[in-house]
Image (cartoon, helix red, strand yellow):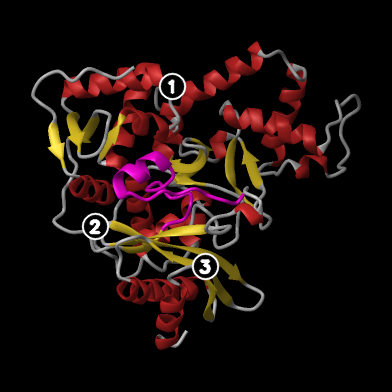
């Protein structure tokens, strides 16, 4: 279902303008702070809307990299403080997928929480209501706790149902999705720490009324549009993983209210929507490595339409069949994706390993190599690594190795 385009003719954007609108919306034109602070982190989260969480730690945790890409080297303890120290600024929930989101988005997610409960009950119970009640009581009494903590061998009252770690994890996952527990943080092993929402979310957020499904859908599309700048219906729906029907209705309503402006983008075969406050900078001065989980590139079709950059993550592809490598990051220079590098942080030896480096067609290897070498040096410093080591794979590797050598890394 594609919303109709009432009113004036759609605004026409060149692909270059669309890229600049999109990158500005994502925070790549924000003025840098001399010393990134919690305010810097909150500004970045407002731009991206979410910070996807993933357990892969080949380079850095997925939720840490988008902040580095936009603000440069920063103290990652800011993320811990924002998500674990009261008053919390952000909280994990199933927003895009597992992701940090601003705490004020919690009420808009309640309809999603209710839907998880409805689906669970419709599928038939995998355990009795008493099991959930017992787990919730344990969390309330002992939280914050991991699922493993609930199977620590501590004495329990006679007649207790008797959980094990796997069962506790399944129950906690349901309670998390339904909003009956919340994520209070993570331990050193990156295991989730669960607690009751009253000890995680600010009281004023918990006290806010639950919006209707329609109101919540409009808010999610509104935020997705602000983070995109310009987007198709599919892009807007995917940002918060909404249902097609709910997203389409919300887009129609926001077009009618003037918050979304119908648009056509050069080379796009679908109608687009421009956020009414979207900015079009004359240039983008970005120099950034983007993680596979960065919002700029996670919707692969959009990445290809905007940048002419075909991108696939190959973590789950057998080694012999990989085209570019295991953990490959696109390199953004200006408003173009000009290269890609397969990276690994070898923490034991203090090296940032560049297994492979590839330039995109039509780029200047020398210019790209020098800028990429500078970015890799900043990344290595941020990660606490001493040297950058460039391998031999990829057409950009020789020039990059030379540039890294000139920089003394």
- The disc placed on residue 154 is none
Say if 3 sits above or below 147 in the image. Answer: above
Q: Position of residue 100 (x, y in %)?
A: 48, 44
- Residue that appears at 62% across and 50% down: 186
Q: Nearer the viewer, mark 3 or mark 1?
A: 3
Left or right: where does residue 240 sit relative to residue 145? Answer: left
Label 3 environment density (alpha carbons within 10 Å; few <14, some 14–19, many ≥20): many
- Residue that appears at 58% across and 41% down: 183
For label 3, the residue is: 356
- The Cα–Cα distance between marks 3 and 1, rounded to whole angstroms, is 39 Å
- The Cα–Cα distance between marks 2 and 1, rounded to whole angstroms, is 32 Å
For label 1, the residue is: 243
Report which quarter residue 275 is drawn in: top left
Q: Residue furthest right?
A: 158
For label 2, the residue is: 29
| Residue 22 lies in the magenta-colored region | no
Label 1 environment density (alpha carbons within 10 Å; few <14, some 14–19, many ≥20): few
Label 3 residue SS: strand
- State which tag comes first along the sequence, 3 or 1: 1
What residue span does the magenta drawing correspond to?
Answer: 290-315
Q: Is residue 212 visible?
A: no
């Amino acid at each position: 279902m594609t919303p109709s385009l009432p009113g004036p003719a759609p605004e026409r954007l060149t692909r270059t303008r669309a890229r600049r609108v999109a990158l500005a919306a994502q925070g790549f034109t924000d003025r840098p702070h001399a010393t990134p602070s919690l305010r810097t982190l909150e500004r970045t989260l407002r731009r991206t809307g979410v910070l996807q969480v993933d357990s892969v730690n080949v380079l850095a945790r997925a939720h840490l990299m988008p902040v580095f890409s936009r603000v440069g080297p920063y103290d990652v303890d800011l993320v811990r403080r924002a998500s674990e120290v009261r008053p919390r600024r952000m909280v994990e929930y199933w927003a895009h997928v597992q992701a940090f989101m601003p705490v004020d988005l919690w009420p808009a997610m309640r309809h999603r929480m209710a839907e998880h409960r409805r689906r669970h009950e419709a599928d038939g119970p995998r355990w009795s209501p008493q099991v959930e009640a017992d787990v919730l009581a344990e969390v309330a009494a002992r939280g914050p706790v991991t699922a493993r903590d609930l199977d620590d061998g501590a004495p329990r009252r006679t007649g207790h149902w008797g959980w094990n770690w796997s069962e506790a994890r399944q129950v906690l996952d349901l309670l998390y999705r339904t909003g009956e527990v919340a994520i209070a943080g993570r331990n050193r092993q990156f295991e989730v720490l669960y607690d009751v929402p009253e000890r995680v979310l600010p009281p004023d957020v918990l006290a806010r009324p639950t919006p209707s499904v329609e109101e919540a859908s409009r808010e999610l599309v509104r935020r997705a549009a602000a983070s995109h700048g310009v987007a198709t219906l599919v892009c807007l729906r995917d940002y918060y993983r909404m249902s097609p029907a709910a997203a389409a209705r919300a887009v129609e309503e926001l077009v009618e209210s003037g918050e979304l402006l119908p648009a056509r983008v050069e080379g796009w075969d679908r109608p687009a929507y421009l956020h009414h406050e979207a900015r079009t900078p004359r240039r983008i001065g970005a120099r950034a490595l983007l993680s596979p989980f960065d919002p700029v590139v996670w919707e692969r079709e959009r990445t290809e339409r905007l940048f002419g950059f075909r991108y696939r993550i190959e973590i789950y592809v057998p080694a012999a069949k990989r085209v570019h490598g295991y953990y490959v990051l696109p390199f953004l220079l200006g408003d173009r994706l000009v290269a890609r590098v397969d990276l690994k942080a070898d923490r034991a030896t203090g090296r940032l390993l560049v297994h492979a480096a590839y330039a995109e067609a039509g780029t200047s290897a020398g210019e790209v190599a020098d800028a990429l070498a500078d970015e890799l040096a900043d990344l290595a410093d941020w990660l606490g690594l001493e040297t950058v080591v460039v391998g031999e794979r990829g057409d950009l590797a020789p020039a990059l190795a030379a540039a890294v050598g000139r920089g003394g890394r």
